[in-house]
Image (tube, rainbow, N blue to C red):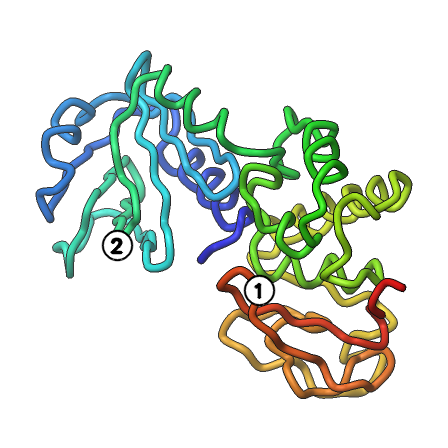
Amino acid sequence: MPEGHTLHRLARSHQKMFGKAPVEVSSPQGRFEASAKLLDGLPLVRAEAHGKHLFHRYGRDLVVHVHLGLYGTFSEGPVPAEPPRGQVRMRLVGATHFADLRGPTACELLTDHEVAVVRARLGADPLRRDADPEKSWARLSRSRAPLAVQLMDQRIFAGVGNVYRAELLFRHGLDPMLPGTALGRERWDEMWVDLVALMRDGVRKGRIDTVRKEHTPRATGRAPRVDRHGGEVYVYRRHGQPCLVCGTPVQLTELAGRNLFWCPTCQPAAA
Protein backbone atom coordinates (compact mmCIF):
# COMPACT_ATOMS: atom_id res chain seq x y z
CA MET A 1 0.00 0.00 0.00
CA PRO A 2 1.41 3.43 -0.89
CA GLU A 3 2.64 5.41 2.11
CA GLY A 4 1.88 9.03 2.82
CA HIS A 5 4.67 10.57 0.77
CA THR A 6 3.18 9.01 -2.39
CA LEU A 7 -0.20 10.65 -1.81
CA HIS A 8 1.39 14.03 -1.17
CA ARG A 9 3.37 13.70 -4.39
CA LEU A 10 0.14 12.90 -6.23
CA ALA A 11 -1.57 15.93 -4.70
CA ARG A 12 1.28 18.20 -5.82
CA SER A 13 1.30 16.68 -9.28
CA HIS A 14 -2.46 16.99 -9.73
CA GLN A 15 -2.44 20.55 -8.45
CA LYS A 16 0.22 21.42 -10.99
CA MET A 17 -1.48 19.65 -13.91
CA PHE A 18 -5.12 20.48 -13.22
CA GLY A 19 -5.34 23.16 -10.54
CA LYS A 20 -7.30 26.41 -11.04
CA ALA A 21 -8.62 25.37 -14.45
CA PRO A 22 -11.64 23.45 -15.78
CA VAL A 23 -11.17 19.70 -15.80
CA GLU A 24 -12.95 17.07 -17.84
CA VAL A 25 -14.01 14.38 -15.39
CA SER A 26 -15.38 11.03 -16.55
CA SER A 27 -15.67 7.43 -15.45
CA PRO A 28 -14.96 5.05 -18.35
CA GLN A 29 -15.61 2.11 -16.03
CA GLY A 30 -18.97 3.60 -15.03
CA ARG A 31 -18.76 3.16 -11.25
CA PHE A 32 -18.09 6.88 -10.68
CA GLU A 33 -20.22 8.14 -13.57
CA ALA A 34 -22.97 9.98 -11.66
CA SER A 35 -20.47 11.94 -9.59
CA ALA A 36 -18.22 12.59 -12.59
CA LYS A 37 -21.10 14.29 -14.41
CA LEU A 38 -21.51 16.72 -11.50
CA LEU A 39 -17.83 17.65 -11.67
CA ASP A 40 -17.19 17.65 -15.40
CA GLY A 41 -16.05 21.06 -16.58
CA LEU A 42 -15.53 22.54 -13.11
CA PRO A 43 -12.14 23.97 -12.06
CA LEU A 44 -10.10 21.94 -9.59
CA VAL A 45 -9.72 24.34 -6.67
CA ARG A 46 -7.21 22.33 -4.66
CA ALA A 47 -5.65 18.90 -4.43
CA GLU A 48 -4.32 17.85 -1.02
CA ALA A 49 -3.50 14.76 0.99
CA HIS A 50 -3.93 13.68 4.58
CA GLY A 51 -2.10 10.49 5.36
CA LYS A 52 -3.02 7.90 2.75
CA HIS A 53 -6.08 9.85 1.61
CA LEU A 54 -6.23 12.16 -1.42
CA PHE A 55 -8.80 14.95 -1.76
CA HIS A 56 -9.72 16.88 -4.92
CA ARG A 57 -11.80 19.94 -4.05
CA TYR A 58 -13.98 21.40 -6.81
CA GLY A 59 -16.13 23.65 -4.66
CA ARG A 60 -18.37 23.66 -1.64
CA ASP A 61 -19.56 20.12 -0.88
CA LEU A 62 -17.83 18.84 -4.00
CA VAL A 63 -14.77 16.90 -2.88
CA VAL A 64 -13.49 13.72 -4.48
CA HIS A 65 -12.01 11.39 -1.86
CA VAL A 66 -9.56 8.74 -3.09
CA HIS A 67 -7.94 5.97 -1.09
CA LEU A 68 -5.68 3.83 -3.25
CA GLY A 69 -5.63 0.84 -0.93
CA LEU A 70 -3.46 -2.09 -1.99
CA TYR A 71 -4.13 -1.98 -5.72
CA GLY A 72 -5.08 1.58 -6.66
CA THR A 73 -2.86 3.54 -9.06
CA PHE A 74 -2.86 6.76 -11.04
CA SER A 75 -1.30 6.82 -14.49
CA GLU A 76 -0.61 10.14 -16.17
CA GLY A 77 0.34 11.43 -19.59
CA PRO A 78 0.18 14.38 -21.97
CA VAL A 79 -2.93 15.26 -23.94
CA PRO A 80 -4.47 14.18 -26.18
CA ALA A 81 -5.48 11.38 -23.84
CA GLU A 82 -5.08 7.86 -25.13
CA PRO A 83 -8.19 5.63 -25.19
CA PRO A 84 -8.92 4.21 -21.71
CA ARG A 85 -7.29 0.86 -21.02
CA GLY A 86 -8.50 -1.48 -18.32
CA GLN A 87 -10.95 -0.53 -15.59
CA VAL A 88 -10.52 3.25 -15.32
CA ARG A 89 -12.60 4.41 -12.36
CA MET A 90 -11.97 8.12 -12.92
CA ARG A 91 -10.33 10.04 -15.75
CA LEU A 92 -9.17 13.66 -15.46
CA VAL A 93 -8.30 15.63 -18.57
CA GLY A 94 -6.83 19.10 -18.36
CA ALA A 95 -5.24 21.52 -20.78
CA THR A 96 -1.91 19.69 -20.92
CA HIS A 97 -2.25 16.33 -19.13
CA PHE A 98 -4.63 13.53 -18.28
CA ALA A 99 -4.69 11.12 -15.34
CA ASP A 100 -6.44 7.75 -14.99
CA LEU A 101 -7.34 6.16 -11.67
CA ARG A 102 -7.59 2.37 -11.52
CA GLY A 103 -8.38 -0.07 -8.72
CA PRO A 104 -8.82 2.25 -5.71
CA THR A 105 -10.37 1.15 -2.45
CA ALA A 106 -12.37 4.39 -2.45
CA CYS A 107 -13.29 6.95 -5.09
CA GLU A 108 -16.28 8.93 -3.91
CA LEU A 109 -17.79 12.40 -3.97
CA LEU A 110 -18.13 13.83 -0.45
CA THR A 111 -19.57 16.92 1.18
CA ASP A 112 -17.39 19.17 3.30
CA HIS A 113 -18.89 17.62 6.43
CA GLU A 114 -18.12 14.11 5.22
CA VAL A 115 -14.53 15.11 4.49
CA ALA A 116 -14.25 16.50 8.01
CA VAL A 117 -15.49 13.18 9.39
CA VAL A 118 -12.85 11.27 7.40
CA ARG A 119 -10.07 13.58 8.54
CA ALA A 120 -11.24 13.51 12.17
CA ARG A 121 -10.50 9.77 12.20
CA LEU A 122 -6.91 10.36 11.14
CA GLY A 123 -3.91 11.12 13.30
CA ALA A 124 -1.15 13.65 12.74
CA ASP A 125 0.30 13.62 9.24
CA PRO A 126 4.03 14.47 9.41
CA LEU A 127 3.76 16.07 5.96
CA ARG A 128 0.99 18.52 6.81
CA ARG A 129 1.62 21.96 8.26
CA ASP A 130 -1.43 21.59 10.50
CA ALA A 131 -0.16 18.34 12.05
CA ASP A 132 -0.51 18.20 15.83
CA PRO A 133 2.12 15.77 17.14
CA GLU A 134 0.96 16.44 20.70
CA LYS A 135 -2.20 14.45 20.04
CA SER A 136 -0.18 11.56 18.69
CA TRP A 137 2.14 11.65 21.69
CA ALA A 138 -0.81 11.72 24.09
CA ARG A 139 -2.29 8.56 22.57
CA LEU A 140 1.02 6.74 22.13
CA SER A 141 2.33 7.46 25.61
CA ARG A 142 -0.85 6.28 27.35
CA SER A 143 -0.97 2.93 25.56
CA ARG A 144 0.90 -0.27 26.40
CA ALA A 145 0.59 -1.42 22.79
CA PRO A 146 3.96 -1.99 21.08
CA LEU A 147 5.47 0.95 19.24
CA ALA A 148 5.47 -1.14 16.06
CA VAL A 149 1.69 -1.43 16.29
CA GLN A 150 1.02 2.17 17.19
CA LEU A 151 3.20 3.60 14.41
CA MET A 152 1.02 1.80 11.87
CA ASP A 153 -2.24 3.01 13.41
CA GLN A 154 -3.60 5.65 11.04
CA ARG A 155 -5.64 7.11 13.89
CA ILE A 156 -2.35 8.08 15.53
CA PHE A 157 0.10 8.57 12.65
CA ALA A 158 -1.54 9.27 9.29
CA GLY A 159 0.57 8.22 6.33
CA VAL A 160 3.11 6.04 8.15
CA GLY A 161 3.29 2.58 6.61
CA ASN A 162 5.37 -0.54 6.96
CA VAL A 163 8.57 0.95 5.57
CA TYR A 164 8.66 4.13 7.62
CA ARG A 165 7.60 2.16 10.71
CA ALA A 166 10.47 -0.32 10.49
CA GLU A 167 13.07 2.23 9.49
CA LEU A 168 12.17 4.81 12.12
CA LEU A 169 12.42 2.22 14.90
CA PHE A 170 15.80 1.07 13.60
CA ARG A 171 17.22 4.57 13.26
CA HIS A 172 16.39 5.21 16.92
CA GLY A 173 17.57 1.81 18.19
CA LEU A 174 14.16 0.89 19.58
CA ASP A 175 12.75 -2.54 20.28
CA PRO A 176 9.62 -2.79 18.09
CA MET A 177 7.78 -4.40 21.01
CA LEU A 178 8.53 -1.58 23.44
CA PRO A 179 5.19 -0.34 24.86
CA GLY A 180 4.28 3.26 24.24
CA THR A 181 4.19 3.90 27.98
CA ALA A 182 7.92 3.14 28.16
CA LEU A 183 8.97 5.67 25.54
CA GLY A 184 10.47 8.87 26.93
CA ARG A 185 9.29 12.26 25.75
CA GLU A 186 12.73 13.38 24.61
CA ARG A 187 13.12 10.28 22.44
CA TRP A 188 9.64 10.82 21.00
CA ASP A 189 10.45 14.42 20.04
CA GLU A 190 13.58 13.20 18.23
CA MET A 191 11.56 10.53 16.42
CA TRP A 192 8.93 13.01 15.23
CA VAL A 193 11.53 15.40 13.83
CA ASP A 194 13.24 12.48 12.08
CA LEU A 195 9.97 11.15 10.67
CA VAL A 196 9.06 14.55 9.24
CA ALA A 197 12.48 14.83 7.57
CA LEU A 198 12.35 11.28 6.16
CA MET A 199 8.88 11.69 4.71
CA ARG A 200 9.66 15.09 3.21
CA ASP A 201 12.66 13.50 1.56
CA GLY A 202 10.32 10.82 0.21
CA VAL A 203 8.09 13.48 -1.34
CA ARG A 204 11.06 15.11 -3.05
CA LYS A 205 12.60 11.90 -4.37
CA GLY A 206 9.56 9.73 -4.95
CA ARG A 207 11.16 6.88 -3.01
CA ILE A 208 12.02 6.04 0.59
CA ASP A 209 15.66 6.46 1.57
CA THR A 210 16.47 6.06 5.26
CA VAL A 211 20.15 5.11 5.30
CA ARG A 212 22.52 7.69 6.75
CA LYS A 213 25.40 8.92 4.59
CA GLU A 214 27.99 6.77 6.34
CA HIS A 215 26.04 3.60 5.43
CA THR A 216 25.24 4.35 1.76
CA PRO A 217 26.64 2.20 -1.06
CA ARG A 218 29.03 5.00 -1.99
CA ALA A 219 30.42 5.27 1.54
CA THR A 220 30.72 1.53 2.20
CA GLY A 221 31.45 0.18 -1.28
CA ARG A 222 28.52 -2.25 -1.20
CA ALA A 223 26.19 -2.79 -4.13
CA PRO A 224 23.07 -0.59 -4.28
CA ARG A 225 19.84 -2.17 -3.15
CA VAL A 226 17.80 -3.83 -5.87
CA ASP A 227 14.11 -3.90 -4.97
CA ARG A 228 10.92 -2.92 -6.76
CA HIS A 229 10.15 -0.51 -3.92
CA GLY A 230 13.49 1.24 -4.47
CA GLY A 231 15.38 3.25 -1.89
CA GLU A 232 18.23 2.48 0.48
CA VAL A 233 16.91 1.11 3.78
CA TYR A 234 18.31 -0.55 6.88
CA VAL A 235 15.91 -3.42 7.60
CA TYR A 236 12.75 -3.30 5.46
CA ARG A 237 12.57 -6.37 3.20
CA ARG A 238 16.14 -7.30 4.18
CA HIS A 239 15.25 -10.47 6.12
CA GLY A 240 18.30 -12.69 6.61
CA GLN A 241 20.71 -10.12 5.18
CA PRO A 242 23.39 -8.61 7.41
CA CYS A 243 22.55 -5.41 9.23
CA LEU A 244 24.29 -2.48 7.56
CA VAL A 245 25.55 -1.31 10.94
CA CYS A 246 26.45 -4.41 12.98
CA GLY A 247 26.25 -7.36 10.55
CA THR A 248 23.59 -9.30 12.50
CA PRO A 249 21.03 -10.97 10.21
CA VAL A 250 17.87 -8.87 9.93
CA GLN A 251 14.89 -10.61 11.53
CA LEU A 252 11.33 -10.96 10.27
CA THR A 253 8.11 -11.69 12.11
CA GLU A 254 4.42 -10.98 11.65
CA LEU A 255 2.77 -8.43 13.88
CA ALA A 256 -0.88 -7.41 13.59
CA GLY A 257 -1.07 -9.00 10.15
CA ARG A 258 1.94 -7.16 8.71
CA ASN A 259 5.58 -8.11 8.23
CA LEU A 260 7.92 -6.53 10.75
CA PHE A 261 11.67 -6.24 10.10
CA TRP A 262 14.26 -5.39 12.75
CA CYS A 263 17.84 -5.97 13.91
CA PRO A 264 17.99 -7.73 17.30
CA THR A 265 21.43 -6.27 18.04
CA CYS A 266 20.81 -2.64 17.11
CA GLN A 267 17.28 -2.81 18.51
CA PRO A 268 17.71 -4.90 21.68
CA ALA A 269 14.68 -6.05 23.62
CA ALA A 270 13.87 -3.81 26.54
CA ALA A 271 14.97 -5.20 29.91
Give me the C-alpha separation between circle 2 and circle 1.
27 Å
Residue 264 location, quadrant: bottom right
Mark 1, residue position = 255
Q: Is residue 260 above or below residue 13?
A: below
Q: Position of residue 28 (x, y in %)?
A: 11, 46
What residue type is disc 1 on? Leu
Residue at x 72%, y 48% (from the top left corner): 195
In the rendered image, which quarter contains the N terminus? bottom left
Disc number placed over residue 226 in the picture, else none: none
Instruction: Tell me if residue 239 comes above or below residue 30 in the rendering.
Output: below
Mark 2 vs mark 1, foreground winner is 1
At 17% from the left edge and 27% from the top edge, which residue is drawn? 40
Residue identifier under label 2: 103
Left or right: residue 207 compared with residue 197: left
Give the quarter of the figure containing the C terminus.
bottom right
- Looking at the image, which is closer to me, 175 or 238? 175
First of labels 2, 1 by sequence position: 2
Which residue is depicted at the point 43% across and 39% down?
A: 53
**Relative image position of residue 88 (x, y in whole percent):** 18, 51
Which image quadrant is residue 247 in?
A: bottom right
- Would you say the residues marked 2 and 1 are in contact, meaning their CB atoms lie under 8 Å apart? no
- Can you say whether 169 is above or below 259 in the image? above
Q: Quadrant of residue 35?
A: top left
Q: Residue furthest top?
A: 60
Residue neighbourhood size for the residue with mark 2, other residues' Cα within 10 Å, grouped as few (<14), some (14–19), many (≥20)? some
**Closer to the camera in the image, 191 or 271:** 271
Please give left or right for residue 183 compared with residue 145 in the image: right
Give the residue displayed 33% in from the left and 52% down from the top: 74
